[in-house]
Image: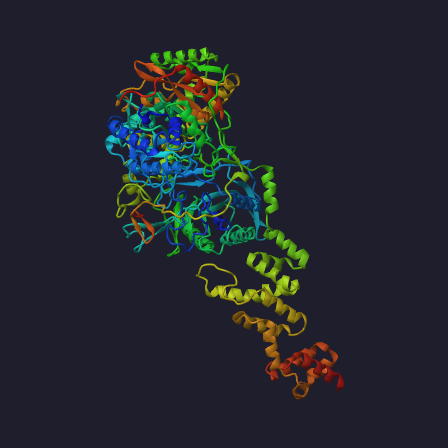
Amino acid sequence: MATTTKIGLEIHCQLTGAKSKLFCRCSSDYRGKAPNANICPICAGLPGTLPLLNQKTVEFAAMITLALGCKFPDEIAFYRKNYFYPDLPKNFQLTQYNAYGITSIGVDGRLEYGNGKDARIRRVQLEEDPGRLVYASGSMDTSLYVLIDYNRAGVPLVEIVTEPDFADTKDVRMFLDKITSIIEHLGVCDTKLEGSVRCDANVSVDGGNKVEIKNISSFADVEKALRYEITRQRTMTSREIQVRSETRHWDDARKVTKESRTKEEEQDYRYFPEPDIPLVMLGSEFVSFIKQSMPELPDTRKERFMSKYGLSAHIAQVLIGNKELADFFESTLMIYLSPKEIANWIVTDLMSFIDERQKKEEEEEEHSLFAGLKVGPEHIADLARLVDQDMINRATAKQILGQIIRTGEMPSALAKRMHASRIDDVSVLAQTVQSVFQMEQAAVQDARRNANVANFLLGKVMKITKGKADPKVALEMIQKKLKED
Amino acid sequence: MPIYTLEAGQVVQGIKSKEFSAEEYISQLFERIEKVEPKVNAFVTLNKEEGLDRARRLDKKIRDGEQSGPLAGVALSIKDNICTKGMKTTCSSKMLESYIPAYDATVIKRLMAAGAIIIGKANLDEFAMGSTTEFSRHGPTRNPWDISRVSGGSSGGSAASVAALECAASLGSDTGGSVRCPASFCSVVGLKPTYGLVSRFGLVSYANSLEQIGPVGRTVSDVVSILNVIAGFDENDHTTTNSSKPTYSLQERKGLRVGLIKEFTEGADPGVSKMIYKAAETLEKQGCKCEEVSLPSVQYALASYYTIATAEASSNLARYDNIRYGFDMNPEGYEWNSYFARARSNFGDEAKRRIIVGSYVLSSGYYGKYYLKAHQVRSLLKREMETLFKKYDVLIGPTMPILPFKIGERIDDPLKMYLVDIDTVVANLTGMPAISVPAGFADGLPVGLQIMADQFAEQTMLDVAYLFEQAAKVQRSPEL
Amino acid sequence: MVVTREEVKHIGWLAKLEMSDAELQRYTTQIEEIINYLNKLDTIPLEQVKPIAIKKKFSELRKDSPENFEDAVLGTGYRKDGFVKGPRMV
């Protein structure tokens, strides 16, 4: 029997592009700091403090709103979501909420991803991150106390909520890739930083009850958590056990979803508008300001790559799928303008090295695409130039790339050294050519009728000389000899 | 006459002209405090050493011919819910019994820069929730006119310290009448500014959308001097109005149009309304035109006020979980829910009641029934007031519908206690300014005249207050 | 309208307030009285009035420039290695 799965997502991205926190002047860069060294009276929730909304975060959230095709309200408000938790300095979270005619910064959007698929975006909202809890001795259950670090408290987050429009985990992966590329292109979030993007998901199978999964700390784990949960629900359904509507937690260590201890249903967040933050009027002037300040989005960049550089849709898509890759491509063009050649080197050859490296470290956290590879745009530009100018052939170029990726040496330097050991002495090569002509008489006959067969003969020469023959010189000699005899 | 009896303006003059030194003045005040404080209980914390030290430094400045500020040497008490860096700020609560702020409220910074000397922190109802200063962990502040009676609240310590000549003036906070009520009960002047005129940065929040910090003094003139220092935009409070800093003055104005709110006088004790009618006559004699006016939506004002105030309070007080600051209670070994609930059981009765009521009106299913309606009432009231202000420069009525009552009289009946705020909450709900000036005495107890004006029309309100004060000449401080 | 002991107990849980049976009893009576007074609000028809609110323009918001707060912020003595000690999360 065919089963239907409905998946919705709640994506949190930290606005790491903002320098200060959402409501205070503390740095938004809390990573690697001593515990509680990145706090002030406001984000620590001291009595008498008032939130001071960061202009930049509104600008960033508006850019995300536009990129996801959402509508802007005339004015935005913040709400208090009231619940107690030791990582929340005020015991309420400042967030946005859609009620009584006031909405969050973005509503009712739609985003295309993958091959013509699209997902509806319910809302985009700005909110604050809580602090961090650390379990000192062993586990949560055994320690006598918890350790709290408020450095992260108040870091700006944008939450993107989708409708349950995904049918399988592959769609989810493609959608998350697209979101990643968008926020990277907007410069609002460095998705490579640990914990900068998080995702909650909700799943229902065959029209059954919806289950929320929380605590998924990276995009990479979303697919795993979903796959586990879909299997769990399907197994229950096949045994005719009803799936309960509940909130479950993703257990990162055991890779399973678990029942939550606090029942979400019993919570009552008592939302009401934050009186200390004025309504922020957006209006048409603001919207046109955001439109003007929008950096190029991945889709537009793809179009440009195709029209300006003549790249194929496939190659352009691979490049813009990851901002780092697309930036690498354009930086290379700045040095040497040979778009198709360079795009090919990046998408086919360079990517195969990257894939290989990523496979090895699958379980590790995501970091820069080029981590551990000693290659920059100048290397690829140099390589493409060598090939374009017939200094080396493609096979040699590949060989060179394989080496310099580990050493960081410039391709032209390596090519020069290889060249030095090369046999281009006509008298030495003449002997080898002569012996190939004797061994491959049938091929020689063919070559006289079909010029392409000369390459076969060249291959033989290269094999005998263990690749040391200068292919250009050798080919010339072969062609000359074919005419002579 | 002893120098501790001087008004703020006279203190500044006296010190500047070297008639007396700031040190003499401050020491005399502390002697006075020692003498009367056992009867009044206006202070939570005294700042004697630092106060004297500041006075000596000011004297040196004056000897050296340096500039001194507009409040140079003026001794102030500060309500203990306004943050003072390095000086305990307890909000009269067990939850903050040892809390020392890491920063100064904006108003404190401005007062210090103007040369004022903070001599102590004044008593209040816990977290400013009350109308009598009985709900204080430090015991009630007693009314200097009759120490068996309440001082009013929640800024009871502020008003009583000013009336008892323990300081020249004070800062209170007014959420539903908390500056004006004790000013009325203690026969001093208390002003609630227009919402957004004075920074709330550093005021421990009770109900953010309603409250303002306001000055208390023995004269309109003193209240104006302080307001001129503390008013104006603050980058640390996004609800302050972004306009140029206002300066208020005392001016004689004739022919002002005055509306007497009939719902206020009708609902008041006969002794109180008699004094208010008398006050209206006094104003007429000074050339004002007085007429009775009606404000029909006032019948919903208290319900609106207690809905909004408790809703905001229930959320504001959530942060007091004793984890980051508070009293000494080791969290080790407690399950977190029970630690929070145990620590928070140390709130006083009234704070707990308001937390529960506020959580109730916000809980799911009730938001539209209470909170939203309460906001609707605010808009209705504002509309009615704006209509009246097209015809009248100010609106007047009693500040309090009753005379100061006996300590303990209403403490067990919360609703009865709430009802005394009926005349003051209108200004908070509409964001408009209001002032209480002494109107006289009924049965030997003070009665306050409340004057309200349109938003940011403080100058007009002060004109009427000054006119009345000059004509009525009501006694400001009792024998103690 | 009736406010029940169970409702007050649930709110006590939401608001993290420990109450003895006697307190619960007393608060229930008092809060019922207060809520009944607030019910006055329900007698006015809800209309579409714009609530009073402070408004600001985007340009008036805080500029994004970070600053360090130098003084000690947290008052609690229950600390370990810079962390704040909190109760058990079970």
From the viewer's perspective, tell me whether residue A17 is left or right of residue B406: right
Front-most of residues A330 and A122 = A330
Front-most of residues A285 and A93 = A285
The answer to whether one can see residue A44 in this image is yes
Front-most of residues B451 and A103 = B451
Task: Examine the rendered structure and indicate whether residue B254 appears above or below residue B304.
Answer: above
Q: Residue at x 45, y 11 (%)?
A: B284
From the viewer's perspective, tell me whether residue A460 is left or right of residue B60: right
Task: Examine the rendered structure and indicate whether residue A147 appears above or below residue B248.
Answer: below
The answer to whether one can see residue A322 in this image is no
Q: How is the image coloured?
A: rainbow
Image location of residue C62, percent across then percent down: 50, 42
Task: Examine the rendered structure and indicate whether residue A308 appears above or below residue B244.
Answer: below
Front-most of residues A304 and B454 = B454
Q: Quadrant of residue B210?
A: top left
- Number of labels in the image equals 0
Image location of residue A125, percent across then percent down: 49, 42
Image location of residue A388, percent across then percent down: 67, 70
Image location of residue A243, percent across then percent down: 40, 46
Q: Looking at the figure, which quarter contains the N terminus of chain C?
A: top left
Task: Examine the rendered structure and indicate whether residue B398 appears above or below residue B332.
Answer: above
From the viewer's perspective, tell me whether residue B168 is left or right of residue B283: left
